[in-house]
Each structure stands twice: as C-alpha cells, then as structure tokens.
Amino acid sequence: MRVEIWSDIACPWCYVGKARFEKALAGFPHRDQVEVVHRSFELDPGRAKGDAAPVIEMLSKKYGMSTEQAQEAENNIAANAGAEGLGYRTEGRDHGNTFDMHRLLHFAGEQGRQDELIGLLYRANFADERSVFDGGDAYLVELAAEAGLDADAARAVLADPAAYADDVRADEREAAELGANGVPFFVLDRAFGVSGAQPAEVFTQALGQAWDAKPRLATLSGDGEVCGPDGCEVPAPGDRA
Amino acid sequence: MRVEIWSDIACPWCYVGKARFEKALAGFPHRDQVEVVHRSFELDPGRAKGDAAPVIEMLSKKYGMSTEQAQEAENNIAANAGAEGLGYRTEGRDHGNTFDMHRLLHFAGEQGRQDELIGLLYRANFADERSVFDGGDAYLVELAAEAGLDADAARAVLADPAAYADDVRADEREAAELGANGVPFFVLDRAFGVSGAQPAEVFTQALGQAWDAKPRLATLSGDGEVCGPDGCEVPAPGDRA
C-alpha cells in the first residue's frame, strides 16, 4: 500500500499530522508493506527566496491578528506538538518560501532518503534555533548530508533553480486535482483521502479501510503476450516480427 | 503519474514488453512526470536456488515440446526482441529461480537504482553469455555495483534470505489481487491495467488515458486541522491538547 502525504515544511499542522500518522502506522499490522511518499505543497509560493519574516509578525501582517492573538495561535500549536512528543519553538521562529526545500525533497526521494530529510527539515524549522529561511543554502546542505545525501550533489540541486522544479509543480497540480486546498493531505492508494492533522485513530481507520479495499482496474483489452506459471505465449506464425 | 510493472527476470515477454513500454514513454509528452516502479512476480517459485536448467531442456521437459518446437519458440521471441533493438541469445540460455534477484530489486528501489538494476539483469539473462542462475551471488553483486549500488550492501542482502523477502511476497499477493495471472502486467495509477507485451501504441494510448483520468478519492470526513494559503486553522479553546 502506498500513502502520499502532501505537506509544506512551513506548515505546523503538517508537522503535527505527520507524527499522528506515524503513530497510527507504527501500530498498523501491515506497516512493513506501507510505502510513504512526501508530496510538495507550498503555503506561500509568492514569497521570494530569502525573504524570511518572523512568524508572529507574518501572522499579524497577513491575517490582521494582534501580536497576542498570533502568539496564542503559536502556543496552541506548540501544545498540540508537545502532546505528540515534538519540540516547538514559539518565539523567534521564521516563515518563508519553501520551494528549494521541496526541490531537495524530490532529489532525496530519488535517493531513498526523503523521509529522513523531511523529518530533519521539520525539526530544523519548528524545534531548532537556526532559521531555515535565511536565504543561504549552507544549512540545507548540512541537513541533506545529515539525511544521508551527498553534500555536493545537494548543493548542485539547490544551485540550479530548474532542478526538480517541474516535480514540485506537478505535485501541486495533482493536489488541486485531488481536491486538496490545504495540508497536510493524505492519499492512500489513490483511493482514500484524509485531510488535516487528524487524531491517530482516524489514520488507523483509514489504513485499515484502504488495506481491505480491493483495487479495481479498468483493463485495456488487447492480445499482448504474457508468461505465466504455465509458460510463455508464442505468437501465431507470421504475427508481428 | 505512476506506472507499476509486474515482471520476472526469467520472463522473455517482460524483457520485450519493457522495451515497448519505454518506446511509448519516450514519446509521451508528460514523461518527466511518470514514475516507474518494478514489482515482483516469479514464474517458477518452486525451483530451488542454484537449480539452473537450459531453457530449451526446461521447455521440452515442462511443456512436452520437442527440442525443435522449443528452439522455434525461442527464435520467435528473439525476433521480437531484435525488432526492439534488444539482444537475445537463443542457445545455451539458462532458466532458474529469481527470488534473490527480486529481493535485490527491492533493495535497489530503496536506493533509487531499481530501473538501472532491472535493465542490467535482463541484459545479463537474455543477451549475455554468463548464466545469472548458476547459484553464486558474485555475478549478481557485480551487476548491482554496475547499477550504482554498494557492492557490500548488495552482498549482505543476498546473503540474508529474509531481506526484502516479505516485499517480494507482498508484490506477488498484490498481483493476484489485481487480477494478474501472467506478466508483464502494467498498472497505471492503480486505475488502468495493461496485460502483456503489447505494441508501443497500446502503451501510448494507456498513458494518455491514465493521464487524462481524474482520480476520485473517497474522502474520510473529520475535523483535522489544515494550513492553506489563507493561514492555519486554530482549534477552538479547550479542543484537544
């Protein structure tokens, strides 16, 4: 079974939702047969790379919250994160553009290191002191190396704005096609969708439902040759080649 | 879009079908957004590891063909392979158990090297002189290294019969659930199935059809918090954490 998770590094509910999903997955009897793929979704694609802003300031500017309301919202999410055993820094955290991180996550996916990298990016953005949005690539390269990627290769991906850019945009188009307006958005075997940082029990139920569902394929007819336990078909004389 | 291909290294139509599919893929306008995953299917799971037999002898023994008929079948497939630009050795080729190769392909998948490895395994089995079924792991380790995998890690996978064994069996169960009795079997976005080494035009049509199809998800209801372009939801006071 395959679970695709659309999310953004700048999305606190994605950070919390991932932990809740993973709690459900850890208790799922067929967990060894579940493949998790991370998909790109940007909360703030219009913001320029390197244009970092303190989260509290962004919340008050963009949504007209008072500083107190913005701080309250951060504290609330921090409490939810804490309940999942996750660190969450409620002061001095930055917000910014995540396009390059998504490009790097696609590169990591090709190298079998996506889950490691997204975990480190979340930790860096939500729990650690240093800003991932300060514009330089050095910190992202460090995190990539910590995730098991080759540092030079990661640096080259970051330095080339076209690298994996189409993959990020394709994920975002697909999110829209699947009806996701916000993240996290979980898709199980392209058959079931779960929206938001639901409690672990909801993910447990979704995993069970998707596991039990038998996929139904529309099979294109035709006479392609196959091999099976009883041997290989042989085309009639004169057929094709 | 995602294409899963169930196949076996010992399956000549899989070798030919893969080339025909790739011809279609090369001409598909959205090819950069197509991910190909190889799935396991064993034609002869009951045969012991190291029990290699000449293909011609196996065909006559197992299916009661005369040596001439068996040779004719091999020549026919070789002509089909040749039409796709593939080498095919019609004399002295071996047949055997492929379980270890499938385990190795799952390991390669984790490392982003699956497509490279399956291409080399096909070439080794169908075009090259040396038998991949002679029982030793050395040749498979060589091919794994040629595919860009770490040779020691590949050797360790082959030496541990449990490594990735469940993944191979899970693929085989899924093939049965999806209705595949023979291979190659192509599944596009878990929605469309194409059976057999069809002409490239059939794959072209299937790719277009799957691309145009909009997936419909059964969305599980619930009140999970999300973040979107307009900000993050904040639970009502007293909610959860």
Image (tube, coloured by chain):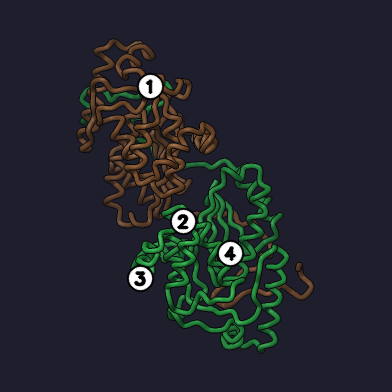
Chain colours: A brown, B green
Query: Which residue in the protein does label 1 denote?
Result: B231
- Say which of B163 and B170 sits in front: B163
Q: Distance between the residues labelled 1 and 4?
A: 47 Å
Task: Tell me the tag on residue B184.
Answer: 4
Query: Which residue in the protein does label 3 denote?
Result: B159
x then y, percent, for residue A77: 26, 27
Q: Do labels 1 and 4 share a chain?
A: yes
Relative placement, left or right, of B24 versus B177 is right
Q: What element carries label 3?
A: helix
Q: Which residue is drawn at 24% across and 13% down?
A: A68
Question: Mark 1 belongs to which subunit?
Answer: B
Q: What residue type is labelled 1?
A: Gly
Question: Mark 4 belongs to which subunit?
Answer: B
Q: How crowded is mark 1: few (under 14 residues within 10 Å), some or many (20 or more)?
A: some
Single out the mark in the foreground, 2 or 1. Answer: 1
Query: Which residue in the protein does label 2 denote?
Result: A214
x then y, percent, for residue B52: 50, 82
Q: Residues within 10 Å of mark 4 (few under 14, many from 20)?
A: many
